[in-house]
Image (cartoon, rainbow, N blue to C red):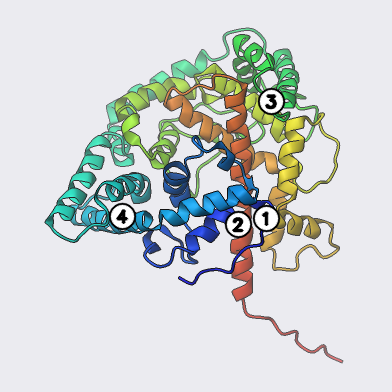
Amino acid sequence: MPTPPSQPTGVRRPRAMVIDHAWRGLGPGLESLSGPGGAPLTRTVKLIVLPLVVRPALRPELAVDFLGPAEAACLDGLIRRSGALLVATAQWFTLLKRTRRALGIVAGNPQDLYFQRCFELATEHGAPSGDVDATDRARAVVEDVADTADGRTVEALKGYLSDAARRARLDGELATAWESRLSGPAPSSDASAAVDLAAVALDACGTPGRSGEAPEYATLVEAGHGELFGRALWAHAGGVWRRGDLPAHLGLTAHQVPPRPQVGRGASTATLPAPLDRTLFERLFVVLQSSARREELPPVPELVGRETGRSCAPLGLHDESLRVAVVLGGRLAVGLDPLGTGEPVLGRTAAHRAVNSRWRREASVLRARRMTVSPHPDPDGGVLDALAQDLRTPWAAYMRRLWVRLHGRDVRDAPLEDLAAAWAVLDGVARSVMMDHRAKVRSALRALSKAPTRVAEPRSA
């Protein structure tokens, strides 16, 4: 793996770029932790580099997206000094995957299950020596992970929900819970009040040092504004966002109001419906598929029992602080404007200015913006034009990802204690959506660069 050219000094650089540069400079031996182009896998960064090598909690100066020269040099040094440890981690991962295949284990994503355990093995034992001890250690880890995840797999969920009598009982429980969901006060006016309070809270979020001072978040939670907002969706409240073209649910359902949840029999990541339209199976499928530490989850019977009530709760969530985060996220989402169109929306806050400013600096967004104003906006065969369209309606992807993240916290009983915690989630989702769009643009450009050049045929006289 060739060492990339040195980067310019004296300027702030994206942390992701610094990590990529340092990683590529480590040389060969990291193939099992890297993508086809030599960059670290997303899960490598998320599960190994950041939490175990960089450790931003101990080095808060490295927790930001853009690093000054000194911070970039520190991060670069941390990764390079960990080179031998990371190579050993990659070797353990290869051995654990081979052991997994030999044992016939297929459940779960090996990267999620083993990455951090491999780093622990490398730290304690160095690189696997290829002897009996290394083989025994690998087998012990694979079997231990399989045991702790037992009863918490998609296969176990499928088996549990295949019983006809159990399915009938669950369907009856869903019907009963759904019929009683509208008991309570009329919520439409309260939904608007929640949106107004959310705006004040978001202004504090986008102002450095103020996220811990705003009382609006506590007011929203204590007054149950998240629950009232969820009830407003059931009552088909309109005008919540002061825009006639935006439904109150912001794409959380494909219907005017969320439908009654069904039990379900299967799921596919490629065809998952909108969050509030998902079956019990689909909701738990996502949780089980995305959990790096499934041993922290309750067994499948308990998961299903809790999810039956949760799926019929306002916004499909039990915890009120997480429901309030949906309201805050919706208020942020309707003001997202990565293309800088300047279209009038419900008053933008300091949080909007911070997120939109970051988004507009993205090269992929600048490319998409040029396409939207071009008289010929489809020069690349439609691929990039479709990605530009995603930026015209950014609230859809944002709300879908936010709900999934909050649902995962609800399953684990992890509320958002204060506004600072809520903002960390809201801002993190915005960054995640932005990074996902960047990756899609890069993939599209690579595909287009490999496409054969079409030669125009001569016109007839």
| Marks 4, 2: nearer the viewer | 4
The tally of labels here is 4
Estimate the spatial distance between the alpha carbons at disc 3 and disc 2, rounded to whole Å: 34 Å
- In the rendered image, the quadrant that contains the C terminus is bottom right
| Residue sitting nearer the eye, 209 or 136 | 209
Name the spot of residue 98 as percent of width and height, x first: 24, 58
Q: Which mark is residue 179?
A: none
| Residue sitting nearer the eye, 335 or 56 | 56
**At 79% across and 62% down in the image, what residue appears?**
377
Q: Is residue 41 visible?
A: no
Q: Would you name the residue on which mark 2 appears?
A: 440
Q: Would you name the residue on which mark 1 appears?
A: 387
Q: Are marks 3 and 2 in contact (CB under 8 Å)?
A: no
Q: Would you name the residue on which mark 4 appears?
A: 93
* Left or right: where 134 falls relative to 78: left
- In the rendered image, the quadrant that contains the N terminus is bottom left
| Residue sitting nearer the eye, 373 or 424 | 424
Q: Are marks 2 and 1 in contact (CB under 8 Å)?
A: yes
- Earlier in the chain: of badge 4 and badge 3, it is 4
Estimate the spatial distance between the alpha carbons at disc 4 and disc 3, rounded to whole Å: 42 Å
Estimate the spatial distance between the alpha carbons at disc 2 and disc 1, rounded to whole Å: 8 Å
Q: Which mark is residue 209?
A: 3
Q: Amino acid at mark 2?
A: Lys
- Earlier in the chain: of badge 4 and badge 1, it is 4
